[in-house]
Amino acid sequence: MKIRKAVFPVAGLGTRVLPATKAMPKEMLTIVDKPLIQYVVDEAREAGIEHFVFVTGRNKGVIEDHFDKMFELDTTLEARGKKAEQEILAANQPEAGAMSFTRQQAPLGLGHAVWCARDIVGDEPFAVVLPDELVLNTPGCLKQMIEAATALDAKANLIAVEAVPDDRTHQYGICGVGKRHGKIFEVDGMVEKPPKGTAPSNLSITGRYILQPEIFKILETQERGAGGEIQLTDAMIGLSKSQKFYGVEFEGERHDCGSKPGFLRANIAFGMARDDLRDGLRAEMKKYLEK
Ligand code: G1P
């Protein structure tokens, strides 16, 4: 199965991290020295994605600017001989024509955001990547999923899953576990944010999906579900009546960067994973904790 396009829903208001997100998109929050959106775009590029589809909203223009060339900056770095900085910028830059931006005009939910990308995605399987969630691992989560997909039939759908404590299952989409095939399993039922004590398992749906284009037809008429929003999970339940869904228990550490403690933890984890920062960061933390 060849996956060429990835959809990044980036229209959310980021209310969990106010006031940082009052005038700045939450996807531009920085983990170490890169915005969240850059991490997930890099993860998608590593997985072989060729086209990046951003479903944006009001006040999100800076995301588009981030992936544009900055003529003044390039010229100044060139004139000052700052080669390393020039290389960083070049590495962050998808090819011209490899990005599309469309708007979700009202906050109707994740399912609606994905549906907004239907004309750009067209009739081919595609990935959905939520920038709130980062997975620290090489290879990245999406690459692991695409590799898992090669052994499956061309009409398979995949979701990345991770076990969460029982008292947190109500915060996520949760899936039931069917037959296992090595590292992956057949999904046996899904439910979005089940009330406490009713979850079919503790395997939560994380922010990575590989979906077949038939999901768009279902999303078109999908009614509002949990939280009064059009839920992607509900549309996946619809699609699972005619197509298989597989859960992938990926390798790597998941970070929920849309919450304040998760965001702070991610900064430390991604900092500690960097050869150029580890020793300095460890020394600073040690000094601070001994205060
Ligand atoms: C969304 C999905 C949910 C999933 C979660 C992962 O929820 O609807 O199934 O578990 O992302 O982050 P949200 O966090 O947008 O409420």
Image: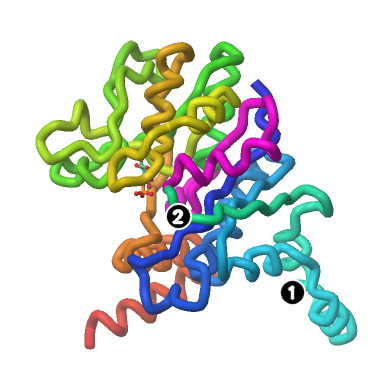
Q: Secondary structure at mark 1?
A: helix
Q: Which mark is residue 108?
A: none
In this view of the protein, which residue sits in the foreground, 173 or 284?
173
Furthest toward the left, the residue is 197
Percent x, y of residue 100: 72, 50
The nearer-to-camera label among 2 and 1 is 2
In the image, taking residue 166 as reference, residue 152 lies left or right, namely right
| Residue at 57% over, 48% down | 8
Mark 2 vs 1, N-terminal side: 1
Q: Is residue 48 visible?
A: no
Corner quadrant of residue 34: bottom right
The residues bearing labels 2 and 1 have C-alpha atoms spaced at a distance of 37 Å
Percent x, y of residue 156: 52, 18
The residue that label 2 is drawn on is 107
Identify whether 266 is placed above or below 83. Answer: above
Quadrant of image for the N terminus? top right
| Residue at 57% over, 26% down | 147
The residue that label 1 is drawn on is 85
Percent x, y of residue 183: 41, 22
Corner quadrant of residue 193: top left
